[in-house]
Image (cartoon, rainbow, N blue to C red):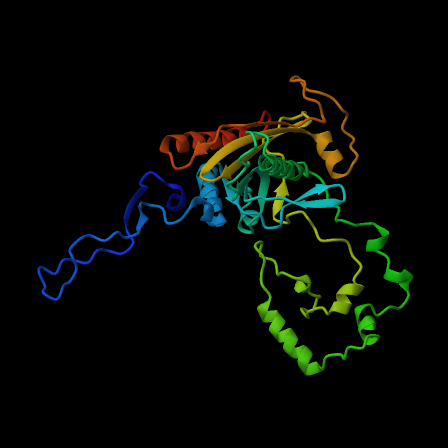
Amino acid sequence: MAQYWDSSLDNYYDRPATPQPESSGGDPMDVDDGKPTQSEMVTMYTGRRTGAGHEMPEDIREETIRSFTEMAAWPFGCQASMPTLPPRLTVRTLLFPIRQSFGAARSPKDRQLARKGVMEGPLFTGQCRPETTFRGADEKPGSGVSEVCDLYREVGAMLLAAQERAREGMTEVKPGEGKWWATRPRWGGAPNDGIEGDANNSDEQPATAAESGKQDAGGSGSRKRSKHGHAAGPGSRRSGNGRRLSNSERWKQVQPGPSVWDKRMTYMQIGKIQDSPFDDIYMVSSINHHLAILHLRVHRRYLDMLTTGESEWPAGTDSTGQGWDELRLRRTRWYDVLDGGERVEAFQGVWRIFHYLMRRREGS
């Protein structure tokens, strides 16, 4: 990160674009009058940086902040790892993609579960963003469109963490599970060849067995894998015998949508105040070479209404006067990761989050 953002050793100077030729010392063949010629000057740089800040790859910031958080996680028996599934915020029947760089979770006491990579939590989440411009020249601080969008990204990531923590003791209901369009055959059960039938009725000539074999051989080796380790494209699902499903077979499948729950995560509200409808959500947010710690207090009824549109939790307020339909967001100042004093102060804040969430409850 310092190779793109550390400007403490920056040094700019001007020099001629082409160096001046050395004097020949009275060469009789030299017809130059000896006067220096005017050459174009260029600005040169010496320092630590190898590129501008906006040119830094995203994974450098993500790995830096994740490693910074993991230094405080290990003493508490926790880990900071990247999500294994694409993070998506559930808003009734919609799934919104969310930027989530990493999440902090607790390792289980059972060694067998720990070896399988099962975690408990999440405790809090982390989000790193590559944006470097947040307002235009004619926009006032706090009123820029990019600033508001950046705030929405942070709130969305914290609401996703709140939804995951609220899954404690619940059973997943996949999208479309129990619905008629995910259980009954298409066209009322009437015979329909689907894609193959449409191909037979078209003027296109079907591919021969040799050509289809070449396509399958080329496609299986050239399929790329996504960031989260899953094969990209609709051909990632396979049948029970390991054979790749054809387009017609995939089209004929009638089943609920894919799961949005992480199979290797035991969802728990670790650190939540018992008998309280509010949950405290924390997040480590990072832009440029700075980080800040955010705190969001959200009511369980708010999460239920956001997720399913209905809730059994009664509407009410707490001692601070916050209603169930309110979101209160607080943040620290932005700490400079390249400054030693501010880096220590930010680390103390992350340590206190782990210390608070991992505190011993009464009766446990």
In the picture, measured across the screen, residue 118 lies left or right of residue 255, that is: left
**Position in image of residue 326 (x %, y %):** 69, 26
The image shows residue 148, relative to residue 235, as above or below, that is above
Q: Quadrant of residue 144?
A: top right
Can residue 153 be seen here? The reply is yes
**Position in image of residue 168 (x %, y %):** 67, 38
Going 33% across and 38% down the picture, which residue do you hit?
Answer: 8
Going 30% across and 52% down the picture, which residue do you hit?
Answer: 40
- Residue 33 or residue 292, whichever sits in front: 33
- Residue 195 or residue 264, whichever sits in front: 195
Quadrant occupied by the N terminus: top left
Q: Quadrant of residue 21?
A: bottom left
Quadrant occupied by the C terminus: top right
In the picture, measured across the screen, residue 99 lies left or right of residue 39, that is: right
**Position in image of residue 240 (x %, y %):** 70, 66
Q: Quadrant of residue 235?
A: bottom right
Can residue 172 be seen here? The reply is no
The image shows residue 183, relative to residue 170, as above or below, that is below
**Position in image of residue 174 (x %, y %):** 74, 49
- Residue 271 or residue 344, whichever sits in front: 344
Disc count in the image? 0
In the picture, measured across the screen, residue 155 lies left or right of residue 60, that is: right
Going 59% across and 24% down the picture, which residue do you hit?
Answer: 362
The image shows residue 285, relative to residue 32, as above or below, that is above
